[in-house]
Amino acid sequence: TTPRWEDTLHAFALELQRAYQLDEAVATAFSRWILDAGDMYAVPPGLLAALINTESHFRTRAVSWANAVGPAQVIPTVWQGHCPGDLTEPGNNIICGAYVLRRYYERFCGGENWYCALEYYHTGPGNMAAKESYAQTRADYVAKVSGNLQRLTDDGVAML
């Protein structure tokens, strides 16, 4: 039988709590947002959670030096035209992050390599041409997301 949505949500929330030391309310809210966004854009929820932990440590109001906002750290001036709604709202932000990651996965990575999509997510397509100057930064970022994914599951790589 297929697990009920509530059971899936609860199980994923427990995993987020355990892996990232989140309190129950935060884990439950993020579980709903991540599972919805993952379903919407066919992005593995564990990968999305690991990306969010890497980008913002599950902070809903995070802002970077590059003006990336929210849990998934999307840049509104770049993505607002592609992602509806207020990108400072966590649910919209995570949906947009899933959209961006999926777009890179399909457009630049042949729909075959989530690690490649993570490199684009971190660096942006314009900076991927500067392979030498950003190579170590990209490798470090992918390793960090991979480590966060490994914390979420004993077999994190299988989730990709």
Image (tube, rainbow, N blue to C red):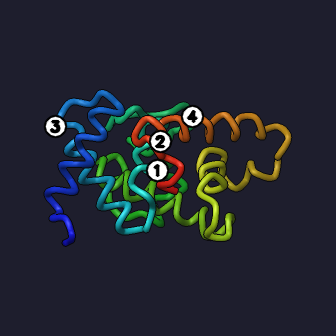
Mark 1 lies on a secondary structure that is helix
Q: Tag 3, which secondary structure?
A: helix
Residue at image x 47%, y 66%? 82
Name the quadrant containing residue 1: bottom left
Furthest residue to the right? Answer: 132
In the rendered structure, which disc, 1 or 3, sits on the residue that comes first in sequence?
A: 3
Q: Position of residue 88 (x, y in %)?
A: 34, 46
* Residue at (46% x, 50% y) in the render: 47
Looking at the picture, tell me which residue is in the foreground, 23 or 1.
1
- Residue 56 % position (x, y): 43, 34
Image disc number at residue 109: none
Graded by Cα atoms within 10 Å as few (under 14), some (14 to 19) or many (20 or more), the crowding at tag 2 reads: many
Amino acid marked by disc 4 = Lys
Question: Label 3 belongs to which residue?
Answer: 25
Which amino acid, by three-letter code, is at mark 3? Ala
- For label 3, the crowd category at 10 Å Cα-Cα, with few meaning under 14, some 14 to 19 and many 20 or more, is few
Residue 92 is situated, as x and y percent measured from the top left of the image, at 33, 56
Q: Are marks 3 and 2 in contact (CB under 8 Å)?
A: no
Name which quarter of the figure residue 41 lies in: bottom left
Which residue position is annotated with label 1? Answer: 47
Say if mark 1 contacts mark 2, CB within 8 Å: yes
Q: Is residue 40 above or below residue 48?
A: below
Task: Give the Cα separation between the discs numbered 4 and 3.
Answer: 25 Å
Q: State the CA–CA distance, disc 1 to disc 4.
A: 12 Å
Q: Rounded to the nearest whole Å, what is the CA distance between mark 1 and mark 3?
A: 21 Å
Left or right of 127 in this view: 118: left
Q: Which residue is mark 2?
A: 149
Q: Which residue is mark 4?
A: 144
- Marks 1 and 2, how far apart at CA: 6 Å
Which amino acid is tagged 2?
A: Leu
Give the left or right position of residue 25, taking residue 96 as reference: left
The first of marks 3 and 2 along the sequence is 3
